[in-house]
Image (cartoon, rainbow, N blue to C red):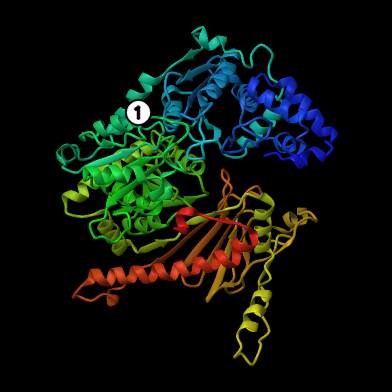
Amino acid sequence: MSSDKETKKCPSDELLKLVELWLKWDQCETTRKEIEQLKNESKWNDLEVRLLHRIQFGTAGLRAKMGSGFALMNELTVIQATQGLIRHMQSIFKDKSETLSVVIGFDARHQSKRFACLTASLFAHEKIHVYLFDSTTVPTPFIPFSIQKLKCQAGIVITASHNPKDDNGYKLYWENGAQIISPLDTHIARSIENNLEPWKGKAWNLDIIQQNSTLISNPIEKICDLYIKNVSNLCCFPELNANTELKFVYTPVHGVGQVYAEKAFSAFKFQPFISVDEQKRPDPDFPTVKYPNPEEGKETLECAIRVANKTNADFILATDPDADRFALAERDTQGTSQTGWNILSGNQLGALLGWWRWFTWRNKNPRVDVKDVYMLYSTVSSHILKSIGEVEGFNTIDTLTGFKWLGNKSHELINNNKHVIFAFEEAIGFMCDPTNVLDKDGISAMAIGAEMCTYLKSIGRTLYQQLNKISLLYGYHINNNSYVICNKTDVMLKMFHRLRHYDQRKDQQKQEKSEADKHEVKEPEILVQYSNKIKSHLSGDENEKLNSKDEEYVYPKSCGKYNITGIRDLTVGIEADFRGEGKDKKPILPCSSSTQMITFYFDNGSEITIRASGTEPKIKWYSEIRKKLKDTQTSEDNPMIDDESFRQETKQELDQLVQQVVQQFLQPEKNGLIQRETTAK
C-alpha cells in the first residue's frame, strides 16, 4: 500500500490530527503499531488512505479489508460502530430499556470472534442482554432466526460472507428479523459519528464476558435444535429421501456449514453425504480456493468435483463460508460440459427451487386462495417466478438487489396475513422458509435442493430436463450475468456518467467512416433526452424545489443492431419509455444517489442492468431475454431437438447483445477493467 515516493509528500494538518487521534484512541497493539510505523516512516499517502475517509456504515453494515485506520475493519472501527448502534437502540427502544436484547454470532474469519466479543462486551456494559454464540461459529441465517425466536431488538453477525480472506464485516439485522434498510442505516451512521471516542472502562474491557455475567448467555443448543426442527418441517418426501440410492457430495468451502448441513441432511432422513475432507473444517485462509464463493463455479468446486468423481456421486452441494448461499451441480451424463458436471446458475436454481416450492406447498395447501400467495425476486434476477405466477395464479413482487429488500417486503406481506413461500436472487441466494428466516439460507436450501433432486430422479428426470419442462410451460428465460473488476471508484463513476450523457453521434460517425462502400452519410438521429430539471411525474411545485445542480441526461438509443426502447435509472430516479411520447415517470423501486444502477430495455425483448456492487470492486451486468416456444416452431418427429435449437438460438442472440453492451458501454480496455477469470477461461 505504501512506497518510497510517499516520503516526499508533506502531510496536511488534518491528517496529522487524525494520526494523533488514532494513536490516542486505539488500544489494539497490532494496529496501533502499524499507524505508528507509517508515521515514523513518513508514509503519508498510505496514512491518507487509511485515515482521511471513514468506513461507511450502510444497509450492509460494515465491510472492508482488515487493517489499521478509520477506513478499514479493525477493533476501533467495530467499537465505534457498536457504540453508535447502542445509543441509537437506547433512544428508540426507551419503552423496552429493561428487556433490551441482542444476538451476536461470527464466522471463521481472522478476527471474527474477537470483533464479536468486543461488540458483546459493550452491550453488556450498557446492561443490554447479549445472546452470544461464543463457543462456535454459526451460519449467518442463525442470526435472523434467533431474533425471532429470542425476541431480540437487533442481531449482529461478524462476517464478510464470500469476500477474500483479508476482508471482514459487521452485518446488522433489526427486530423484525430482516437486514436494516434506509433510513435506519442513516440514523445509525449519524449516531456512530456522535460516539466515536471509545467509552472509558467499557471499550476493550472483556472482563464482563470472562466473568460469566448474567447479561451474557450462549443460545447455541436451543437455537440449533429449534432451527433443525423448523428445517425438518420443510421435508415433503422423507421415505423417498431415506431410500434413495443417490450419492451427494457436500462442501462448506472452508466455512461454517459442515456441522449444520449434516444435521439438516439427517432431518430430511437422508443417509450422510460424502464430505470434502480438504474443505470441511473452518479455515480463515481458504487454502484450496482462490475465491471462496461457490458462485464462481468450477474453480471453487474443483475439490468437490474431484471427490465426486472418485466416489461416483450424482450431485454436488455447496454453501459459501457463512452458509447463507447454496450451489448445486449435477453429473453430466450427456458429455456436454468440460468438467463432466453441470453447475447450475443462480437463476436456474431459482427457477427449479421456485417450481419445487410451489409444487410441494400447493400439495400441502390445496385450498388456500392463490391470491394470498407470494414469491419474490430481486429485479436483477430472472423473471421466471413472475411467469410461473402468471400461469399458476400466485403473486410475485420484484425488489431492489439484496435480501434486505426481499426480507423486509416478505415481513410486510406476512404481517398482512399473506403466504410468502419463496424468494431468491441470482447470486445463489434462496429464502425457502420466510416465516422463520427472513434472509437467504444456504442450509435449508441445501436440504430442500437435495430432496428436489431425489424426487426428480424417482420420476426419471434430470435437473436440466426439468428446467426444459419449466421453459415449455412458462417460457424460456435465458440469462447472461457476469462482472468486471474496477478498482478505481473515479473510473466507475465516469463510466456511469458517460451512460447518462451519451454521445451516440460519435459512435455513429466512427461506424460510417469504417464503411468504405457507403456513399451517403446520414445525419445522426436526434437523441432522446431526459432531464431531472423538469420531471413529468412531478408536480409544478415539486419541480420548482429542484436545485441548480440538477442536470440533463442523455441515454443511448441503441446498441449493435438493437434499439433501446426504454431505461430505468435508479440512481437519479428516472424511468422512461422511448417509444411514443416517451414521457418519464418515477420508478416504483426505491432510488438512491449512493448506488449506480441503470437498466436498458431492448426491442428484441432483452433487459440488461448494469450495476456497481456495494460490497466488492465490481461492475456487474444482469441480462435476460424471455421468449416462449410456439407450437408451430416444433415438429412432431423430435420436439426435444427443436426445443434445444430454440434455446440455443435465443441464448446466442442474448450473448451477442451482451458482448456489444459490455464493449460499447463499459469499454473494458479503455477503462482498464479486469475481466472475470472464470469468464475468460
The residue where tag 1 is placed is: 227
Q: Where is residue 185 in the image (x, y as percent from the top left)?
A: 62, 36
Q: Nearer the viewer, residue 664 or 264?
A: 664
Q: Which of 10 and 501 is in front in this view?
A: 10
**What is the three-letter code of the residue carrying label 1?**
Tyr
Question: Which residue occupies the extreme top position in the image?
Answer: 211
Q: Where is residue 503 in the image (x, y as percent from the top left)?
A: 69, 71
Residue depicted at x 62% and y 73%: 581
Q: Nearer the viewer, residue 105 or 9?
A: 9
Q: Using the rendered view, name the quadrant where residue 441 is placed.
A: top left
Q: Is residue 291 above or below residue 113?
A: below
Residue depicted at x 53% and y 59%: 609
* Mark 1 neighbour class, 10 Å CA radius: few under 14, some 14 to 19, many 20 or more: many
Q: Is residue 124 above or below residue 612?
A: above
Q: What secondary structure is found at the residue carrying circle 1?
A: helix
Does residue 158 appear to the left or right of 552 in the view shown?
left
Give the tally of numbered discs.
1
Q: Can residue 199 be seen in this view?
A: yes
